Image: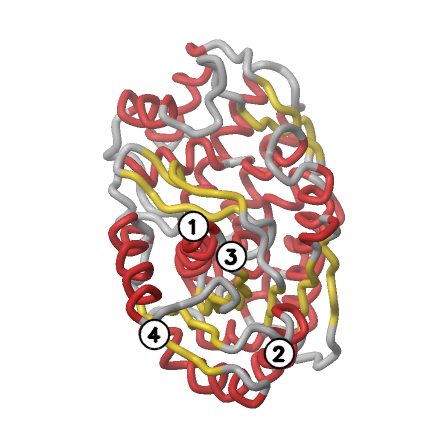
């Protein structure tokens, strides 16, 4: 893998930060955290899960201690079901028991669930403490660790309870992908496909041309996808930090995807897999209302299918999916905005799609006709 360090800047005035991407970046965690958190921070709490901590915890701890930090470690469960208020309460209790102070910091070491939970804890404890994201899955590296959206799930919907709280730094070491199960790698690639569809046709084409290298864990290929995805998200977030306009396009595939996760109690799908189904459904809705040529709609669905078979949805019922969509956090004035493609590389936000069209597309998805 390439050892060249790369940096993406997220420009948000006093909340600005850098995303550092480099092989071996975990060894630089202490220096990066010290520069980001400042000299007054004496302690950091590492929030992780047992599997990730077993791979990388001691390495990260060593680097932090070398930079002068005292470290505490709190391990949480894995999977979307662990992203709950109950898990957050345990983390808050840990910080309180250890007399954590506002000048201390949190290190989120893990995938998207750890990052979202740790970020939410950082946003809410003592009305906000600083934190650093160290994403160890591809999905977290290209998406959830960047942009400051933190949340926990509720049985009625995903990410309904949360806050915007930007990290002080993001540390990405592509070498962590070597310990990632293939299914997790694929789950991240669905989000990479999303970036290509919403913003950059060249990225979409690059992914389809280089899938073999992706799954062979070619460092140069993965680093390019990570960097470009982070650049796109940084540009969108810089323009619209709190999702009042442009940032909504990052939810392409997520409306149906979140509903699929909710109705299966967060047990069946990896987040990226649910988004994969959602992107296919959105492309069909766009085709049905005539805003995308059939060939482009098909190209999007084929780019999703090229990553491999998605978990089954044919046993699910469309009324429960539609009901879960109605609880989506993006609903405004009773209308559900949908992110719909007009071509590979461009999307629009529409809240005027007829319910009959949405129902028809969901039925096609659940009967494996798309």
The local crowd at label 4, few if under 14, some if 14 to 19, many if 20 or more residues have their Cα within 10 Å, is: few
Q: Determine which residue is flagged by label 3.
A: 139
Q: Nearer the viewer, residue 36 or 320?
A: 36
Taking 209 as reference, is 132 above or below it? below
Precedes in sequence: disc 4 or disc 3: 4
Q: Residue at x 63, y 15 (%)?
A: 290
Quarter where residue 77 is shown: bottom left
The local crowd at label 3, few if under 14, some if 14 to 19, many if 20 or more residues have their Cα within 10 Å, is: many
Q: Quadrant of the N terminus?
A: bottom right
Taking 237 as reference, is 133 above or below it? below
Q: Determine which residue is flagged by label 4.
A: 51
Label 4 vs label 3: CA separation?
17 Å
Residue 298: mark in rendering = none
Relative to 64, 324 lies left or right: left
Please say if the residues under marks 4 and 1 sit with CB atoms less than 8 Å apart: no
Q: Nearer the viewer, residue 123 or 171?
A: 123
Label 1 vs label 2: CA separation?
28 Å
Precedes in sequence: disc 2 or disc 3: 2
Precedes in sequence: disc 1 or disc 2: 2
Task: Kindly report which numbered mark, 3 or 1, lies closer to the viewer in this rendering.
Answer: 1
Q: Determine which residue is flagged by label 1.
A: 124
């Amino acid at each position: 893998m390439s050892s060249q360090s790369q940096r993406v800047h997220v420009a948000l005035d006093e909340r600005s930060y850098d995303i550092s991407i480099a092989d071996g970046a975990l060894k630089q965690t202490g220096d990066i955290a010290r520069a980001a958190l400042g000299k007054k921070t004496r302690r950091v709490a590492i929030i992780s899960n047992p599997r990730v901590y077993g791979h990388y915890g001691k390495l990260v701890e060593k680097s932090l201690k070398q930079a002068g930090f005292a470290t505490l470690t709190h391990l949480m469960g894995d999977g979307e079901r662990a992203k709950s208020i109950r898990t957050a309460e345990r983390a808050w209790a840990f910080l309180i028991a250890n007399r954590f102070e506002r000048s201390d910091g949190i290190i989120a070491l893990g995938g998207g669930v750890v990052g979202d939970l740790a970020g939410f804890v950082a946003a809410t404890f003592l009305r906000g403490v600083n934190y650093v994201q160290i994403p160890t899955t591809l999905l977290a590296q290209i998406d959830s660790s960047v942009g400051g959206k933190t949340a926990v799930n509720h049985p009625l919907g995903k990410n309904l309870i949360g806050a915007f709280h930007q990290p002080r730094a993001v540390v990405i070491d592509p070498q962590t992908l070597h310990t990632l199960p293939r299914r997790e790698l694929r789950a991240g690639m669905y989000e990479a496909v999303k970036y290509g569809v919403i913003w950059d046709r060249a990225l979409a084409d690059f992914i389809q041309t280089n899938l073999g290298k992706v799954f062979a864990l070619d460092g140069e290929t993965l680093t390019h996808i990570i960097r470009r995805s982070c650049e796109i998200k940084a540009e969108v977030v810089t323009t619209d930090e709190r999702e009042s306009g442009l940032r909504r396009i990052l939810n392409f595939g997520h409306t149906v995807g979140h509903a699929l996760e909710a109705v299966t109690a967060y047990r069946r799908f990896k987040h990226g897999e649910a988004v994969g189904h959602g992107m296919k459904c959105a492309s069909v809705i766009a085709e049905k209302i005539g805003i995308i040529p059939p060939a482009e709609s098909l190209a999007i669905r084929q780019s999703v299918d090229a990553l491999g078979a998605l978990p089954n949805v044919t046993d699910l019922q469309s009324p429960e999916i539609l009901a879960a969509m109605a609880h989506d956090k993006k609903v405004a004035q009773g209308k559900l905005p949908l992110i719909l493609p007009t071509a590979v590389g461009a999307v629009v936000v529409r809240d005027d799609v007829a319910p009959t069209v949405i129902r028809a597309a969901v039925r096609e998805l659940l009967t494996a006709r798309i």
